[in-house]
Amino acid sequence: MVNPGRAIKKRHWLQAGILYILSLVLVVFFVGPLFWMVVTSLKSPAQLYSYTIFPRPIAWNNYITALRSIPFFRQLTNTVIIVVVNVVGQLLSSSFVAFGFARLRSPWKNRLFALVLATMMVPQVATLIPSYILFKELGWIDTFLPLTVPAFTAHPFNIFLLRVFYQGIPIELDEAARVDGASSLAIWHRVILPLSKPVLTTIAVFTFQNTWNDFMGPLIYLQTPEWFTLQLGLASFAGMYSVDWVSIMAASAVIMLPCVLVFIFAQRFFTESLAFAGLKE
């Protein structure tokens, strides 16, 4: 006679083994290109098209050559300025708008919120030409303004994420603050924001990665090489008839490093806020 406990245990180990195998396959699928990028960046041009996986010897000079081929520190400064302004703009505007949808009373609140979410269905390409014409009429072309000012108009996904998080905060805290004479602005600043660090960190990570990796925006609005970002700097390695793959991989590894570090250090807040939003919804 088969022991039911042993059968359940075997089924548990079988399911765990399948999950581990699938996880390993996904890790290889996602980490493989990153590994190949780093390995290629350490090869010499002669080893680039060889069957050697690990370079011998390791060409550390590829990184120095790649960073010297472009005005790296100037482009890094431009990128950091745009990223910082976007992160601050999204945190302020999105948290403020989401507070209104989550805490304030209005007969049109739900309809307006549905309208805001509906804008996520509009492709970014559809608004590209009107946006360019608007910024051109304002005289903002070849400046950082088209890449920074829109961040202060809030993003629908960030509003959704913050609204769900705010709804999980007890309303009694707002009522207690109003008894003490606090206004809605004071409640948002002194009560809601200090309790929203996980979701605010998640939005900051999203905004950081999207802005840091943005290529299309700087390509469209920036014309003077002095204002180029790191993503535009990568494009300079691609020649008309040939591509310097070694330098591209070395520069890409350096540019990718901040995104990896930010995600690693903010991963705890990232998973907490998304799990909370999913359970609440």
Image (spheres, grey):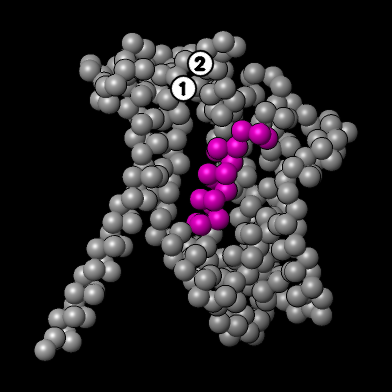
Q: Is residue 236 visible?
A: yes
> Which image quarter holds the N terminus?
bottom left
Residues marked 2 and 1 touching at CB (< 8 Å): yes
- The residue most toward the right is 137
Q: Residue at x 59, y 25 (%)?
A: 232
Please name whichever residue, 159 or 189, is drawn nearer the observer in this view of the structure: 159
Q: Is residue 143 visible?
A: no
Q: Position of residue 15 (x, y in %)?
A: 28, 69
Q: From the image, tell me which residue sits under label 2.
A: 243
Q: Which residue is mark 1?
A: 248
Residue 264: percent from the left, percent from the top? Answer: 38, 49
Q: Nearer the viewer, residue 252 or 125?
A: 125
Mark 2 belongs to which amino acid?
A: Val
Real-space Cα distance between discs 2 and 1?
8 Å
Q: Quadrant of residue 238?
A: top right
Which amino acid does the dot numbered 1 rest on? Ile
Q: Residues within 10 Å of mark 2 (few under 14, many from 20)?
A: few
